[in-house]
Image (tube, rainbow, N blue to C red):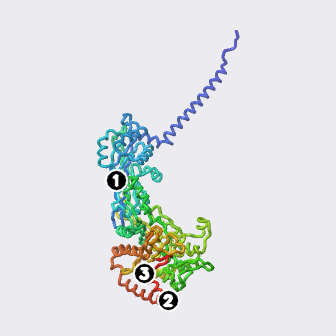
Amino acid sequence: MSDRPIKLERDEQHMFNVRVVVAGIIILFALLAILGRVYQLQVSQHEKYAELSRQHYQKRIPIPPNRGQIYDRNGVLLADSHTQYVLEVVRDNIGDENGDGKSSLADVDGLLDRLGKIIPLIDKDVRLFKTQVRRFKYQPIPIRGDLTEEEVATFAVNRPRFPGVTMEVRMERYYPLMETASHVIGYVGRIDARDLERVNKDEYIGTTHIGKSGIEAFHEARLHGKAGYHEIEVDAHGKKQSVLSEQEPIGGEELFLGLDINLQITAEQSLKGERGAIVAMDPTNGEVLALASVPTFDPNLFINGITQKDYTTLREDPSRPLFNRALQGTYPPGSTIKPMVGVAGLAEGVVTPGSRVYDPGFFRLSGQKHVFRCWNKRGHGSVDLKYSIQQSCDTYFYDLAYRMGVDRFSGFMRRFGFGDKTGIDLPGEASGLMPSKEWKEKRHKRSWFPGDTVNIGIGQGYWLATPLQLAHAVSIMANRGVRLKPHVLRGVRTARNEEESVLKPEPFPSIDTQDRFWNLTIQGMENVMRPGGTAKAAGAGAAYRIAGKTGTAQVFGLAGGKYNAGRIAKRLRDHALFVGFAPADDPKIAVAVIVENSSGSGGHTAAPIGRKVMDAYLLKQYGDHALKPEGAVAQQEAEQAAAAAVAADKKPEAAAEKTKQTKGKKARKGHD
């Protein structure tokens, strides 16, 4: 038998040491994993798990804020809120029907099926509810609002059948003046998934409506306010035990608009039966006094979801009542821009106050056969700038624009705000179009021709402007170059500050040129409203001095034919326009009017509407005594006598021609 030992002590010791090391490494890694997990739970994700733990015994119930009200400048209520009953669902409580304290999306679907059998549910609301209920398990989510009395009674009887569903009292929007100023105020509607993408979702838990258009949409952040909450303690089944803390919601700000609602009503009624727009502004601060787009619509139809029948009626109406013509409608400005073109010509040195042009009734480019007609086919004879504005002589402005050139012309008109958005605090504003060489080459793949420049000289051709831009431009005229940003919001009032806080005007770069240039063109605009001017009937008997300019914009060309409004379809008739401000010596209101497809010219149709709007504001706001009618009339008579003497000396036959025109004889091109 061998004396060799069965096991070697040294081998056993080595094997033991290896096992100890391996075990130590395993234990070390285990400890490191435990420490890592502890760090994750206690440090990196502490807030997350603390919140999950807290939610087992605490819940935060949001309280939606009351939406701010909207008033006009005189405190007339334009947008109010009244109470409504709303059904809300807390997903975490739905499972109590089975006694397990848990819920799933399948339980939600079952609840909706049962609830829909006693309370009609709207598909759009159900889709939004399902989007929100996935994210907010413990928060009340609205499923149906604006319950009728019968529906309230029905749910009250069946309440025990629907765990997790409660009926709450909420505030609902209401527009007491209905169609009046609907394009300005806008409307609210039920929140949808797209709305939630642009707001803080946590702030809108429990809120059912959001601004969709107008002031309601643009100033949504001001109007909505800040949500509050109740912090409550619950048991294992989610039942409320006590209130731990609460924070009251902060209601939205009350907005005061620059609108004078009586003036707004006058503007809308003045366009009744027509399609068109009126914008009235205070040129001293940029406040919008009236912004009318006719026809209008009732915003109350949209609050809780407009019916398919009502929406189809509005959408298919050829008058397009949902279209905000004042902001989004773009039209050739016609002769309304001639005073601005006159200022540009004087400032650029293309013409002087004494420059005269002979008007034979047409304008022709050198070496070309094409004729650009003046509205007066017999011409106005030798005319200067002031008389050309008074008589709206096309030939003078054809010549001025051609000699200025499109680059200088378009550049200067942009200083009046044409071709760019004004930046008004309303959504959906159009920029219009101030054409240029670069624009035509990019848009039409064609070069700019001299005839294009001639056409824009009288506000035709490619040039397009919105009624708001025209009101803004004539406000700049009234201010003699000072340019202020148009705005609808005048001031705000918060719960903390009961006094209205009036906003300051926001200046734009002004048009800096000589005062005498402004004075000359404004004198021409005053003469428009006097005997011998294109809007003499609209200016007759005014208790204040008016500076205005009429315009007629072509909708289509006749290719040499004679225009007769009574023999063509209404949609093909010319647009009638008017811009003006008053009092001319102390401007308080600037107005732009457009009547689509009018049967009359700017002087016949649009100018009387402009005068009516001015009267409604000035005579009521300031009274006859503040407008110094005696001095205005005396000065008017003196200037009329001087103008008559000049006209008799320069062109005696012009009076005979104007007499014929008042009897109904007119040419096609740019008659104002």
Image coords of residue 152 (percent x, y): 30, 46
In the picture, which quadrant includes the N terminus?
A: top right
Q: List the residue tagged with mark 3.
A: 663
Disc 1 to disc 3, C-alpha distance: 60 Å
Determine which quarter of the picture holds residue 410. Answer: bottom right
Q: List the residue tagged with mark 1.
A: 171
Q: Are marks 2 and 3 in contact (CB under 8 Å)?
A: no
In this rendering, the answer to whether 204 lies above or below 387 is: above
Q: Residue at x 49, y 88 (%)?
A: 651
Determine which quarter of the picture holds residue 608. Answer: bottom left
Q: Which one is in front, 588 or 188? A: 188
In this rendering, the answer to whether 20 lies above or below 8 is: below
Q: Disc 1 marks which amino acid?
A: Met
Lower sequence index among marks 1 and 3? 1
In the picture, the disc for residue 13 is none
The answer to whether one can see residue 18 in this image is yes
Q: List the residue tagged with mark 2.
A: 650
Image coords of residue 164 (percent x, y): 36, 41
Disc 2 to disc 3, C-alpha distance: 23 Å
Q: Please name which of the two marks, 2 or 3, marks the residue nearer to the observer.
A: 3
Helix, strand or loop under label 1: strand
Q: Please name which of the two marks, 1 or 2, marks the residue nearer to the observer.
A: 2
Q: Residue at x 45, y 90 (%)?
A: 645
